[in-house]
Every structure is written in structure tokens, then in C-alpha cells.
Image: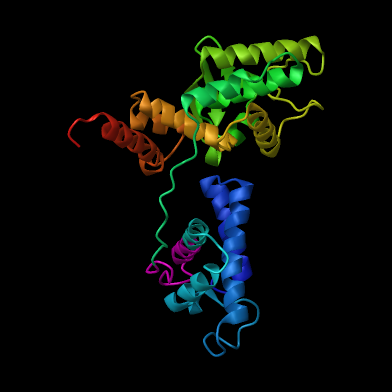
């Protein structure tokens, strides 16, 4: 292990993310890109003599210093948002943790580097009236419109990610208990309740699908299909929603992830427990879920200012 090139060490790290942590291909590609970018920038831009000039290829991990990590972050500020820089720094920290575990390096040069302070961004969401108007605007009088109504009823009813929606199979729905089985990040499964409106919309869509004989309603098949009978992509779902929102005349641009925010905000406003919402959303950390409290607190303060006689 000690004699591996930096390129090989990066590949070993990414393989470990897949095998040990179950990260998706997309996440692994992101880690690989960020770490390779760091070493490439050092190789191309760091002042001569500050690294091992006898080395061929990328700089060796055991020559990296905290100053070099800060230099890299400085180059990122010119073209990246703070949230992206924080993600890249986190990837580098994780890589060096792996190398310490493997005995390649003795310390983590990225550990002492401060993560850029993030701007607190309130998630985009729709008020209840707009959410209902969006769903009710989809007249399920054709197969594709019935599919669209079922998809967005399901996203709002369950608060699942758009990738989780497109991965749903017919067999993942248990109508007797009104529960769906969702496969989330890291291939982690969870059970999520689904409402009557969403179930009814799904049944209507699958009934139309069977009538038009585009696809047999097989238990193991994809739940939502494109016009050619294949599984929908997340990009397709986003484009469909953008078109519907535009035709509906919504003032707020909305994405499939925005419907997930809308679900969480409406649940929280109705009195749902934060930890229950955490379970429904599939968040591993409660801190991830707590961002939705900003929305409700803002609304609470607005109500207070309007209603309290002695502010």
C-alpha cells in the first residue's frame, strides 16, 4: 500500500466507498473528481520547490500540508459557491481519513482547515393553496396526464426524493397498509405512508396503462413509465413538473425537490414531530431536517407581529 501512486490510492478510496458504505455511482464519481482536482491543482499551480520535485505524476499524499489545502480552497472561491467548496473539502478530509486508516499518512492536513461558513438558505416550498392548485390543474384525462398526476401526488404525499420516485416498482406499494417501500441513499430501505389521494391517482394511471396495453401491469415492473414503456429519469420528471407549474401560473418556480420541501414544511406546520419527519424523509441526521424549522419560525414570527397587541 505504501508504494501506490496517488492515482491508485484515489481509486482504492472510491472502491471502498462503494463496497463498504454503499455509495451510489454518482456520489463516487463526485468524490473522485473533487480529490483528483485537488492534487491536479497543486501539481499545476503550487510554487516550485514546495513539493517533491523528484515525484512523477501527482504529488504524494504524505507531502500535502494544511497550507496547500488552504491554497486550493482559495482557487475554488473564484468559481464555486460556498456549499460546493464545503462539499469538496469534506471529500478531501474523508480521503485522508482513509489513508490514515491504511497507514499511508500519519495525519490529515485537511482536518484543521475551517469549512466555509454557509449561508442559511430557506428551502423553496409552495403554500398549501398553491400546492393544491398545482395538483388539481393536472386533468388525468389521458394516460400521460394520469401518470403525471400520480407522480406528483406521490411526491407530495410521501416526501420522497425524485430518484426514489423513479426507482419505485409496482411491488413496492402495499395497498392493504397504505405503505410504500423506498430505496434511498446508500441503498437504505425505509417504509413511508402514502395517502388515499396518491393511491387513487396511481390506480387510475395503472388502469389506463393496462387499457391501452402499453405495458403489462407486472408486479416487478417500474411503477412510472415514459411514453416508450421504459423507466422515467429524474430529469424527465423535473422537466414535466416545470412545464405543469408554468402552465398553472405559479409565481414560485418549483422542482421535484421543492415538493419534498413542501411536504416537510406542511407536516411541520401541522404539528408533526421533527424526528418523525426525519424518519419519513430518510435523513440520517436530525440536523439535516432542522432546516425546515426556519420556514415555520419565519411564519410564526410573521403571525406574532400581526396578531400580538403589545409587540
Magenta segment includes 108: yes
Quarter of the image where one finds residue 246: top right
Instruction: Residue 75 in the image: state x and y as whole percent.
Output: 54, 72
Give whichever of 60, 237 is nearer the camera.
Answer: 237
Give whichever of 222, 47 is nearer the camera.
Answer: 47
Instruction: Residue 307 in the image: state x and y as whole percent.
Output: 26, 28
Quarter of the image where one finds residue 111: bottom left
Farthest residue toward the front?
309
Placement of 259 over or under 106, stated as above or below? above
Q: Which residues are magenta?
A: 92-113
Instruction: Residue 35 in the image: state x and y as whole percent.
Output: 57, 65
x 50%, y 61%: residue? 85
Instruction: Residue 79 in the image: state x and y as whole percent.
Output: 58, 66
Q: Quadrant of the C terminus?
A: top left
Q: Is residue 159 left or right of residue 213?
A: left
Placement of 88 over or under 279, stated as above or below? below
Magenta segment includes 15: no
Q: Is residue 282 left or right of residue 294?
A: right
In this view of the protein, can residue 264 be seen by the observer? yes
Q: Is residue 57 left or right of residue 89?
A: right
What colour scheme governs how the chains and residues are painted in the rendered image of this protein? Answer: rainbow
In this view of the protein, can residue 174 be seen by the observer? no
Placement of 133 over or under 32, stated as above or below? above
Give whichever of 133, 156 is nearer the camera.
Answer: 133
x 58%, y 62%: residue? 34
Amino acid at each position: 500500500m505504501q508504494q501506490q501512486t496517488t492515482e491508485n490510492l484515489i481509486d482504492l478510496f472510491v472502491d471502498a466507498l462503494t463496497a463498504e458504505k454503499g455509495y451510489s455511482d454518482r456520489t463516487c464519481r463526485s468524490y473522485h473528481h473533487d480529490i483528483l482536482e485537488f492534487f491536479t491543482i497543486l501539481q499545476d499551480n503550487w510554487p516550485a520547490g514546495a513539493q517533491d520535485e523528484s515525484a512523477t505524476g501527482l504529488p504524494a499524499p504524505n507531502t500535502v500540508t494544511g497550507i496547500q489545502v488552504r491554497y486550493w480552497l482559495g482557487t475554488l472561491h473564484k468559481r464555486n459557491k460556498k456549499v460546493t467548496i464545503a462539499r469538496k473539502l469534506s471529500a478531501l478530509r474523508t480521503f485522508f481519513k482513509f489513508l490514515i486508516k491504511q497507514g499511508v499518512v500519519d495525519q490529515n492536513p485537511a482536518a484543521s482547515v475551517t469549512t466555509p461558513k454557509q449561508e442559511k438558505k430557506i428551502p423553496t416550498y409552495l403554500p398549501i393553496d398553491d400546492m393544491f392548485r398545482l395538483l388539481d390543474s393536472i386533468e388525468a384525462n389521458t394516460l400521460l396526464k394520469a401518470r403525471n398526476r400520480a407522480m406528483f401526488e406521490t411526491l407530495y404525499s410521501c416526501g420522497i426524493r425524485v430518484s426514489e420516485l423513479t426507482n419505485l416498482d409496482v411491488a413496492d406499494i402495499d395497498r392493504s397498509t397504505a405503505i410504500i417501500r423506498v430505496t434511498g441513499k446508500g441503498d437504505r430501505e425505509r417504509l413511508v405512508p402514502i395517502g388515499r389521494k396518491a393511491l387513487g391517482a396511481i390506480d387510475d394511471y395503472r388502469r389506463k396503462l393496462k387499457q391501452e396495453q402499453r405495458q403489462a401491469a407486472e408486479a416487478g415492473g417500474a411503477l412510472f413509465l415514459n411514453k416508450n414503456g421504459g423507466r422515467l429519469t429524474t430529469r424527465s420528471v423535473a422537466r414535466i413538473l416545470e412545464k405543469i407549474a408554468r402552465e398553472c401560473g405559479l409565481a414560485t418556480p418549483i422542482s421535484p425537490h421543492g415538493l419534498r420541501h413542501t411536504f416537510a414544511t406542511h407536516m411541520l406546520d401541522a404539528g408533526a414531530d421533527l424526528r418523525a419527519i426525519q424518519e419519513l424523509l430518510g435523513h440520517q441526521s436530525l440536523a439535516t431536517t432542522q432546516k425546515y424549522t426556519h420556514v415555520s419560525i419565519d411564519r410564526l414570527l410573521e403571525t406574532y407581529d400581526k396578531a400580538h397587541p403589545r409587540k
